Image (cartoon, rainbow, N blue to C red):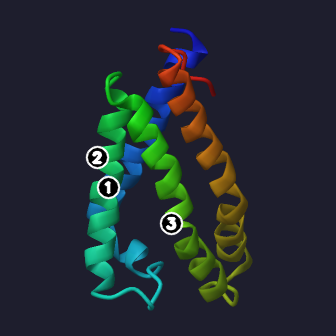
Amino acid sequence: MPRSDRSPLLLAGLLATAGVAHFVAPRQFDATIPRILPGSPRAWTYGSGAVELALAAGIAARRTRPAAAQAAAAFFVGVFPANVKTAVDWRNRPAPQRTAARARLPLQLPLVLWARSVASGAARGGEAGA
């Protein structure tokens, strides 16, 4: 399978794994929910996990891939504040945890670009880009 054909499936797998993790270990995600959001952190955790699972399914299906990948790019932008909150909240934790929280911040950009690449590749007729 060419790399361009694997890229959407890898992105879908990443989203599916993250989505499942929101339900299996919700507590770690609850802590990342910005306090400014209304409702309980657990509701946001489950909601974002469900969105990730839906995006994964949409990207896995060729017919819905362009729209789902664009939505994934927007989702990655939308969850950035949670990553900022984690980096701020974890500033006094041990170095490995601090480093992990800070490393997530610049990783959002490649995720956004990857999703956009998958969307544009799918829109061009099947090439996924990477």
Label 1 sits on what residue type?
Answer: Val
Instruction: Give the residue at x 63% y 56%.
Output: 108
**Distance of label 2 from label 3 (alpha carbons):** 16 Å
Tell me how far mark 2 sits from mark 1, CA to CA: 5 Å
In the image, farthest residue toward the top: 1
Category of crowding for the residue at label 1, using alpha-carbon neighbours closer than 10 angstroms: few (below 14), some (14–19), many (at least 20) = some
If you read the primary sequence from the N terminus, does the residue marked by circle 2 or circle 3 appear first? 2
| Picture layout, residue 6 above or below residue 65 | above
Q: Secondary structure at mark 2?
A: helix
CB under 8 Å between discs 2 and 1: yes
Query: 112 and 67: which one is in front?
Result: 67
Residue 51's disc number: 1
Residue 56 in view:
yes
As drawn, is 105 to the left or to the right of 19?
right
Q: Which residue in the structure is indicated by mark 3? A: 79
Disc 1 from disc 3: Cα separation: 11 Å
Tell me which amino acid carries mark 3. Val
- Say if residue 13 shows up in the picture: no
Q: Quadrant of residue 130?
A: top right
x and y percent of residue 26 in the render? Answer: 32, 71
Q: Residues within 10 Å of mark 3 (few under 14, many from 20)?
A: some
Seen in the image, is 29 located left or right of residue 84?
left
Q: Position of residue 54 (x, y in %)?
A: 28, 46
Position of 51 compared to 104: left or right? left
Looking at the image, which residue is at 48% across and 14% down? 126
Q: Which mark is residue 54?
A: 2
As helix, strand or loop, the secondary structure at mark 1 comes to helix
- Secondary structure beneath label 3: loop
Kind of residue sitting beneath label 2: Ala
The vertical placement of 9 against 53, above or below, is above
